[in-house]
């Protein structure tokens, strides 16, 4: 499928984002992981990716085929694909695909659906949510001493402690890594364009095709961002590098955007469950 069909009606965007993909009978119901043979988790919760990615289908959540070979993919919109391929793999190994995930991200960001999604999810969420790990990061993590610790925590129901890959730590980092034009309006005006002509991708996958030239510069000021927890209908991943739990004032500290603890728990985030290992896996260690 060269071009993914996209729904144009803004009213359908929120429905697509919250809709649960109907999975076929799959590994999701299996007592073991087809990737590493563990009986503590299923394929969708596996962090072991010595080759850089996880073989399987994000729609069916099994290891029998790739996403592009799935009948669900043929009927999927770009929002569907981004949701299961990228958004649901926050700070985790990417699914193996015929087309690298960042190409789908670039297609989504160039579509008419991107800005309405930004408004629907809220800018802060889109800006800060980490993306899947690069292949290089996933390979190194799978061989690290901390792998068992993080996999055990994830198996125990704590996904908020996973390390993030600095090259894909958020939408800005991912766009810079894969040279994707960054088009977004943070201040309520016309979209601001930023081109990333910088370093080549650190992933074994090829970066996206050359971006369209842009003239405007982009500077993010946290004071310009407002957050309303009622706008969030997703499970927010917690990259450890730019957030921390503040026990004194019972607020989830982000520069300019504290969220009360009750709102965190409302969306399934339990700061008291975060271990002491939030920053324990150092990407630069041994580099």
Image: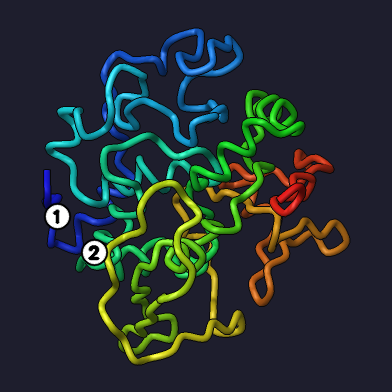
Residue that carries the numbered disc 2 in the rendered image: 113
Write down the quadrant of residue 106 in the picture.
bottom left
The mark that comes first in sequence, 1 or 2, is 1
Q: Residue at x 12, y 49 (%)?
A: 2
Q: Nearer the viewer, residue 230 or 21?
A: 21
Write down the quadrant of residue 76 in the picture.
top left
Above or below for 115 versus 45: below
Determine contact: label 1, label 2, CB under 8 Å: yes
Q: Secondary structure at mark 2?
A: loop
Which x, y percent locates residue 116? Answer: 29, 68
Q: Residue at x 43, y 81 (%)?
A: 186
The count of marks equals 2
Which x, y percent locates residue 127? Answer: 50, 66
Above or below for 174 versus 162: below
Left/right placement of residue 191 relative to residue 90 reads: left
Left/right placement of residue 56 relative to residue 269 reads: left
Which x, y percent locates residue 233? Answer: 44, 51
Residue that carries the numbered disc 1 in the rendered image: 6
């Amino acid at each position: 499928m060269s071009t993914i069909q996209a729904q144009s009606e803004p009213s359908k965007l929120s429905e697509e984002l919250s809709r649960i993909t109907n999975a076929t009978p799959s590994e999701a119901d299996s007592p073991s992981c087809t990737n590493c043979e563990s009986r503590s988790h299923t394929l969708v919760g596996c962090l072991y990716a010595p080759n850089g990615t996880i073989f399987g289908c994000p729609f069916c959540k099994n290891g029998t085929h790739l996403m592009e070979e799935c009948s669900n993919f043929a009927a999927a919109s770009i929002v569907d694909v981004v949701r299961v391929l990228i958004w649901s793999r926050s700070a985790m190994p990417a699914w193996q695909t015929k087309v690298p995930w960042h190409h789908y991200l670039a297609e989504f960001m160039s579509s008419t659906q991107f800005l309405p999604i930004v408004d629907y999810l809220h800018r802060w969420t889109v800006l800060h949510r980490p993306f899947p790990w690069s292949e290089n990061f996933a390979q190194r993590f799978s061989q690290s001493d901390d792998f068992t610790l993080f996999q055990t925590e994830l198996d125990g129901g704590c996904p908020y402690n996973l390390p993030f890959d600095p090259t894909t730590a958020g939408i800005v980092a991912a766009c810079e890594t894969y040279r994707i034009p960054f088009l977004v309006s943070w201040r309520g005006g016309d979209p601001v364009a930023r081109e990333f002509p910088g370093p080549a991708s650190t992933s074994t996958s090829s970066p996206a095709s050359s971006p369209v030239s842009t003239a405007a510069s982009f500077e993010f000021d946290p004071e310009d961002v407002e957050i309303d927890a009622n706008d969030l209908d997703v499970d927010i991943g917690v990259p450890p590098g730019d957030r921390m739990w503040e026990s004194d004032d019972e607020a989830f500290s982000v520069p300019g955007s504290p969220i009360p603890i009750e709102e965190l728990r409302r969306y399934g985030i339990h700061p008291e469950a975060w271990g002491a290992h939030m920053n324990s896996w150092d990407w630069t260690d041994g580099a």
